[in-house]
Image (cartoon, rainbow, N blue to C red):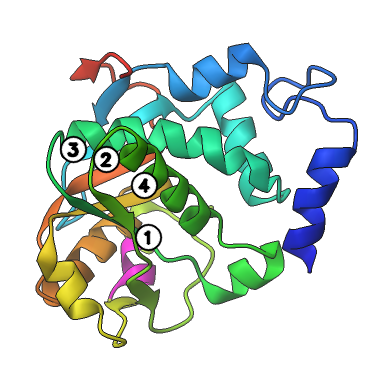
Amino acid sequence: MRGWWQEIAGLVLPAECAGCGRARTSLCEGCVAAVCGAGVRRVRADPPPEGLPEVWAAAGYADEVRAVLLAHKERGLTGLARPLGVSLAGAVRAVAPGGAVLLVPVPSARRAVAVRGHDAMRRIASAAARELRREGTCARAAAVLRQRREVADQSGLSARERRENLSGAVTARRDGCGGLLKAVPVVLVDDLMTTGASLAAAARAVEAAGGRVAGAAVVAGPCDEEQDRRPAL
C-alpha cells in the first residue's frame, strides 16, 4: 500500500526537483544531465576486496546524484527509477557492449526493504533492462540472489568490517535460478559502489551457482576516479 500511495502522490502533488530542489519539477534538466550524462567510467575500490569484478559507474556519488539516489531509496520517490535506470543502462553497456545479458541486482536486506516499502535496486535494474531492450539489446533483470542471513547496516563500517559483515551472507536462490544464471553473461548491478564488498560477495555467489560474471555496473561511484572515462551513450 505504501508503494502504491507514493506513486500516486508523485503524480498529483506539487513536486520539487529531487536533485537540486527546484520547484514544480520532479527532476530538472540539469539534474537529469548529472545523473544520465556525466560520462561512464571505470571505478576501483582501495583496497579491492577479493573477487571484485571490473566495475563501471555512470556518475560520481556527490551533490545532485547523491540526492536523487537517496530520494529514490529512502524517501520512496519511485518515479525516479526510470532516469536512474537509464543511467545504469549506460554503465551496463560499458561492461557488456553487445549480446544478451542478465542484470542481477545486489540483494538488499529484507528488513531494509520492509522499512522503505520498496526494493529500490530491483526497481532500477528493471528500468535499466527495459532501456537496454528499447535500444535492441536482449536484456533481462532478475533478482536471483538473496541474503541468507541478517547483516548489519553497511553505512559507517570500514572496508574490512564490510567484508566480514557480508562474508557468506549472499547466495543464489533455490527456485530454479541456476539455469538462468548459466544461460547468458551476468552483469551485477547496484546503485552505488564504495568499498566494493557487496559486489564482491554477489560475484562469489553467482560464480558458486555456475554463472559467469562479465562485470559490474553502478549508477554512482567514487568521485576521485578519473581514468578510463567514456562519454555517455
At 23% from the left edge and 40% from the top edge, which residue is drawn? 137
Q: What residue is disc 4 on?
A: 129
Q: How many marks?
A: 4
Q: Is residue 102 above or below residue 2?
A: above
Dot 4 or dot 3: first in sequence order is 3
Indicate the position of residue 43 as horizontal and vertical percent values: 26, 32
Q: CA distance from mark 2 to mark 4?
A: 26 Å
Dot 4 or dot 1: first in sequence order is 1
Label 3: element kind: helix
In magenta, the rendered stretch is 162-167
Q: Amino acid at mark 1?
A: Val
**Which circle, 2 or 1, is nearer the viewer?**
1
Label 4: element kind: helix
Work out which quarter of the rendered image holds the N terminus and state it: bottom right
Identify the disc placed on residue 106: 1
Indicate the position of residue 105 as horizontal and vertical percent values: 37, 58
**Which circle, 3 or 2, is nearer the viewer?**
3
Dot 3 or dot 2: first in sequence order is 2
Dot 2 or dot 4: first in sequence order is 2
Q: What residue is disc 3 on?
A: 95
At 32% from the left edge and 30% from the top edge, which residue is drawn? 90
Tag 3–tag 2 contact (CB < 8 Å): no
Please give left or right for residue 153 compared with residue 55 in the image.
right
